[in-house]
Amino acid sequence: DGGITQSPKYLFRKEGQNVTLSCEQNLNHDAMYWYRQDPGQGLRLIYYSQIVNDFQKGDIAEGYSVSREKKESFPLTVTSAQKNPTAFYLCASSTNPGLAGGEQYFGPGTRLTVT
Amino acid sequence: KQEVTQIPAALSVPEGENLVLNCSFTDSAIYNLQWFRQDPGKGLTSLLLIQSSQREQTSGRLNASLDKSSGRSTLYIAASQPGDSATYLCAVGRVGGGNKLTFGTGTQLKVEL
């Protein structure tokens, strides 16, 4: 089956620890995205990558880092510098990153709780 | 800065009713508009994508329209079913490359038996 996988589904960490969220896609999409979802707010863009070995900051990149060493993978690290890391994290991918109209497809999400 | 608003925040209808969900955006310079469905605790499922040059798209019982000049889109659901109960999200594709989306906060729909 083609799609996007995120692991783990639930993640618990202590404050001050870095944590890495996994995102893998087998849709052969060039572009990948990370969003954060908080109750009562729309999804907000953290980072995006239009091609391997390249990525750009989104609207709320502070306290996060990413890498894009393979087309299929776009891991997100939540660092200890992120003030409010507890949230639902969603990964997405799409075709045609430089053109209008690329439909975005989403993974099942990872719920991160930091205490 | 693009802002996307969805009203109402919640909606409850009886089964079989036709309904319309609304999405408005402040900047008419968009690349596309995408409607999603989200079930509790799950990821987003893409329902319809409308390119900026299009006026509407249809898929089964769903029809989405786009009026860029007025900054509005509607999602029409025909003959609603309990299985349609979910949160519906509207997202606008930004001009400037990268296919970045700006999301609304969603309409939570409940279809009752």
Image (cartoon, coloured by chain):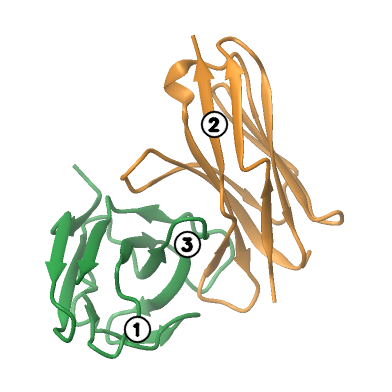
Task: Tell me the mark number nearer the camera, choosing from 3 and 1.
Answer: 1
First in sequence, mark 3 or 1: give its number.
3
Q: Nearer the viewer, residue A20 or A105?
A: A20
Which image quadrant is residue A35 in? Answer: bottom left
Residue topped by disc 2: B109
Hue used for the chain lettered B? orange
Residue hosting label 1: A83
Amino acid type indicated by mark 2: Leu
| In-front residue for pair B84/A48 | B84
The disc labelled 3 sits on which kind of residue? Leu
The chain that appears green in the image is A
Judge the density around disc 2: few (<14), some (14-19), many (≥20) Cα neighbours within 10 Å.
many
Give the image location of residue B112, x and y in percent: 51, 15
Residue found at x 72% / y 48%:
B54
- Disc 3 to disc 1, C-alpha distance: 18 Å
- Residue A63 vs B108, above or below: the answer is below
Q: Residue furthest right?
A: B69
The image quarter in which residue A83 lies: bottom left
Is the residue under label 2 in contact with that under label 3 (CB below 8 Å)?
no
Q: Is any part of residue A21 visible from this angle?
A: yes
For residue B30, side relative to residue A10 (left or right): right
What label sits on residue A43 in the rendered view? 3
Q: Position of residue A67 (x, y in %)?
A: 24, 84
Amino acid type of the residue that numbered disc 1 sits on in the rendered structure: Lys
